[in-house]
Amino acid sequence: MSVDGTTDETMELEAELARLQQEHRDLDMAIEALEHMVAGDQLQIQRLKKRKLVLRDRIAIVNDRLTPDIIA
């Protein structure tokens, strides 16, 4: 693979990582807001928490792809 291709892939992964992290933060705020409501929708809260876990896993995968393998 060419150097440009690697750079493009890295830039795309960094952009995806930033987007995923922002969505994760947004979900965190939404969950907190729903939990503080008197009549908070528990089913909606659980769905948001599941989505947040999926995002966390995806963030870890993207981070692993961005971090170079170091052979010790």
Image (cartoon, grey):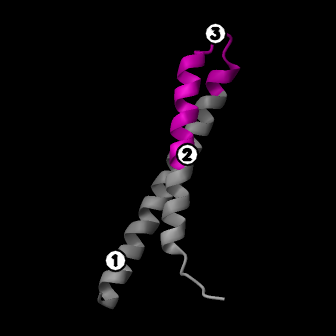
- Residue pushed farthest top? 39
Q: CA distance from mark 1 to mark 2?
A: 24 Å
**Residue stretch rendered in magenta on the structure:** 33-55
Q: CA distance from mark 2 to mark 3?
A: 23 Å
| Image point (34%, 77%), residue name | 8
Place of residue 62 in the rendered image (x, y in percent of width and height, measured from the top left): 48, 63
Write the residue at 55% across / 18% down.
43
Q: Position of residue 14 (x, y in %)?
A: 46, 67
Left of 16 or right of it: where is 52?
A: right
Q: CA distance from mark 3 to mark 1?
A: 47 Å
First of labels 1, 2 by sequence position: 1
Q: Position of residue 23 (x, y in %)?
A: 50, 45
Nearer the observer, 68 or 10: 68
Asked whether disc 2 touches disc 3, contact meaning CB atoms under 8 Å apart, the reply is no
Quadrant occupied by the N terminus: bottom left
Does dot 2 land on a helix, a strand or a loop? helix
- Identify the residue position indicated by label 3 in the image: 39
On the image, numbered disc 1 is attached to which residue? 8
Q: Amino acid at mark 1?
A: Asp
Q: Residues within 10 Å of mark 3 (few under 14, many from 20)?
A: few
**Does dot 1 land on a helix, a strand or a loop?**
helix
- Quadrant housing the C terminus: bottom right
Q: Which residue is mark 2?
A: 24
What's under tag 2, amino acid-wise?
His
Look at the magenta stretch and give its main secondary structure.
helix
Q: Check whether the beta carbons of the residues at disc 1 and disc 2 lie within 8 A of each other.
A: no
Q: Is residue 53 magenta?
A: yes
**Residue 23 located left or right of residue 4:** right
Which mark is first along the chain, 3 or 2?
Answer: 2
Q: Is residue 25 above or below residue 16?
A: above
Give the residue at x 42% y 60%. Answer: 16
